[in-house]
Amino acid sequence: MKFFCRNKRFYKGNLHTHTRLSDGRKTPDEAVALYKAHGYDFIAITDHRKRFPGCETSDFIVLSGGEYHYQPGLTAYHILGIDLKDDVITDDSTEPQEIIDRVIAAGGFPILAHPSWSLMTPDEALALHGYEAVEIYNGISAAYANRGVSDQFIDICATRDRITGIIADDDAHFYDYDFCRGFIMVQPEAFTTEAIMKAIRERKYYASTGPKMFQLERDDASVIKVDCEEVEEIYFMSNTWFTSTRTVRKPEGGTLTHAEYTPAARDKWVRVEGKAKDGTRFWSNIIEL
Ligand SMILES: [Zn+2]
Ligand SMILES: [Zn+2]
């Protein structure tokens, strides 16, 4: 099975953006202009506890969204609702499961935001249900808190059968370093809100902070194959903690744009990650075996 279509274009998007409507430093129009100028095709505007209605033009799409919080103790639960058809009303006392349920009731796609930054434990996430994706990369957490990557969190959850979508985004507030960092590359059937959301729900995308993926495949013998832009290393992450074939390195004097992995006997899932020379990465979604 091939996960991407060779002759279909990818659309670039950032699903986590704050504007002056909450604590961001740009207006929605300025945010759109900035992302458009940087080659993005869509963003979601996700102000704090405030739904932004989406809008669509022929060359740029703004997805409706909001971010909702519960943070009474050691852990901060931040949940994005994307493609909301109705307002999601919450306050400080609205517990995370209730937030997720209300996002779903409003027609939205719930994403667990920056678990690593928030010091969320996998057990806390596993106690919740209904969220459809997790941020593996959150730009503002990477830029200012050195805790932007939640890869281990996602792997621990997946190993406990919690398979979700994997998102990279900015959480842009438009300070100096928190925008145009993390993004997803989506392959929708058409350039419409509906088609983009369908592709996100069906996980027809990959996440990245730089390098492009071209193809991801699981062949008839279950060998996982990836084609990508040139990177230094490719990793095949899975639930088997020890395997000697996880890391593929660029050969001395050569290039690395393709790698293959034969799953270990105990592997129940595999996800692929690549690291470019400048430290940026791509992350595939999880392939269930
Ligand atoms: Zn947040
Ligand atoms: Zn945020």
Image (spheres, rainbow, N blue to C red):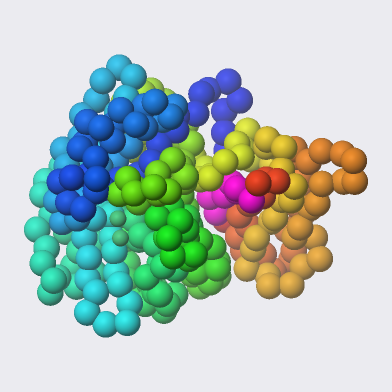
In the rendered image, residue 57, in percent from the top left (x then y), is placed at 26, 20
Q: Residue furthest right?
A: 252
Lateral position of residue 124 relative to residue 246, left or right = left
Res. 98 visible in picture: yes
Q: Residue furthest bottom?
A: 73
Magenta extent: 279-287
Q: Residue at x 33, y 77 (%)?
A: 75
Query: Is residue 283 in the magenta section?
Result: yes
Q: Quadrant of residue 56?
A: top left
Tell me if residue 121 comes above or below residue 89 in the rendering.
Answer: below
In the rendered image, residue 123, in percent from the top left (x then y), is placed at 41, 79
Tell me if residue 73 comes above or below residue 101 in the rendering.
Answer: below
Q: Residue at x 53, y 22 (%)?
A: 8
Tell me if residue 5 comes above or below residue 94 in the rendering.
Answer: above
The C terminus - image quarter: bottom right
Lateral position of residue 31 relative to residue 244, left or right = left
View quadrant of ligand 1:
bottom left
In the rendered image, residue 73, in percent from the top left (x then y), is placed at 27, 82
Q: Residue at x 22, y 71 (%)?
A: 70
Query: Is residue 80 in the magenta section?
Result: no
The N terminus - image quarter: top right
